[in-house]
C-alpha cells in the first residue's frame, strides 16, 4: 500500500529549533541562575505553571509571564521572553526536511503554542528563516 502525504505540521520550539532544554540551560547561564532554576519556575512553581499555561492558550500576556517568571527568578523582567528564548537556533536537519517536503509539493505548516506577539514575536525569526504564512 502506497501512502501519499499532503501536509506536514511541525512544532516551533524544540522541533524546528534547538531543543528547549538546551535553550533554557543557556538562558540560565546567561542570567547567572542556578542550574535548573528556570525549569523549576516554569514546571514546578505553582505561579509559574499557572502563568505559563495561561500564556500558551492566550489567557495571559507576555508581560504577565515576564513579571511572574522574573519575580520567581528574581531577575530583571524587561523583555524577559526575548531573553529566555534568545538561544533558539534553527535545527538544520528538520529545516532541510521541511524544505524537501515543500519541494515535493507537500504543504508545510508550523503549529505552536501561543506566546503572544508583544513585546517580542518568538517565531518572527522562524527556524526556516522565513516570516511567510500561507492559508
Image: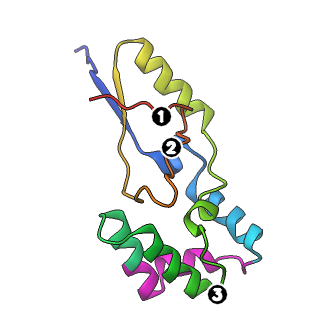
Q: Give the SS element for disc 3.
A: loop
Q: Give the SS element for disc 1.
A: loop
121 in relation to 68, above or below: above
Q: State the image coordinates of residue 80 (x, y, percent, origin top left).
A: 59, 69
Marks 3 and 1, Cα distance to the nearest angstrom? 34 Å
Q: State the image coordinates of residue 13 (x, y, percent, origin top left).
A: 50, 51
Q: Is residue 43 magenta?
A: yes
Which quadrant holds the C terminus? top left
Q: Tell whether 24 sits left or right of 117.
A: right
Q: Quadrant of residue 56?
A: bottom left
Mark found first going from the N terminus, 3 or 1: 3
**Residue located 66% across and 82% down the image:** 75
Mark found first going from the N terminus, 2 or 3: 3
**Label placed on residue 131:** 1
The residue at which mark 3 appears reads as: 74
**Label placed on residue 7:** none
Q: Which residues are magenta?
A: 33-50
Q: Pointer 2: residues within 10 angstroms few (<14), some, or many (20+)?
A: few
The residue at which mark 2 appears reads as: 124
**Residue located 73% across and 73% down the image:** 31
Q: Is residue 66 magenta?
A: no
98 in relation to 9, above or below: above
- Count the numbered circles shown: 3
Whether the residues at callouts 2 and 1 have beta carbons within 8 Å, the answer is: yes
75 in relation to 123, above or below: below
Q: Main secondary structure of the magenta part?
A: helix
Q: Tell whether 26 sits left or right of 38.
A: right
Return the residue found at the far left: 1
Amino acid at each position: 500500500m502506497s501512502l501519499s502525504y499532503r501536509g506536514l505540521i511541525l512544532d516551533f520550539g524544540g522541533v524546528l529549533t534547538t531543543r528547549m532544554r538546551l535553550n533554557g540551560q543557556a538562558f540560565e547561564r546567561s542570567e547567572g541562575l542556578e542550574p535548573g532554576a528556570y525549569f523549576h519556575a516554569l514546571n514546578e512553581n505553582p505561579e509559574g505553571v499557572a502563568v505559563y499555561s495561561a500564556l500558551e492558550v492566550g489567557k495571559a500576556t507576555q508581560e504577565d509571564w515576564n513579571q511572574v517568571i522574573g519575580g520567581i527568578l528574581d531577575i530583571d523582567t524587561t523583555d524577559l521572553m526575548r531573553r529566555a528564548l534568545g538561544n533558539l537556533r534553527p535545527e538544520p536537519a528538520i529545516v532541510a526536511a521541511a524544505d524537501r517536503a515543500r519541494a515535493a509539493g507537500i504543504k508545510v505548516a508550523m503549529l505552536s503554542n501561543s506566546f503572544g506577539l508583544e513585546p517580542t514575536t518568538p517565531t518572527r525569526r522562524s527556524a526556516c528563516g522565513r516570516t511567510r504564512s500561507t492559508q
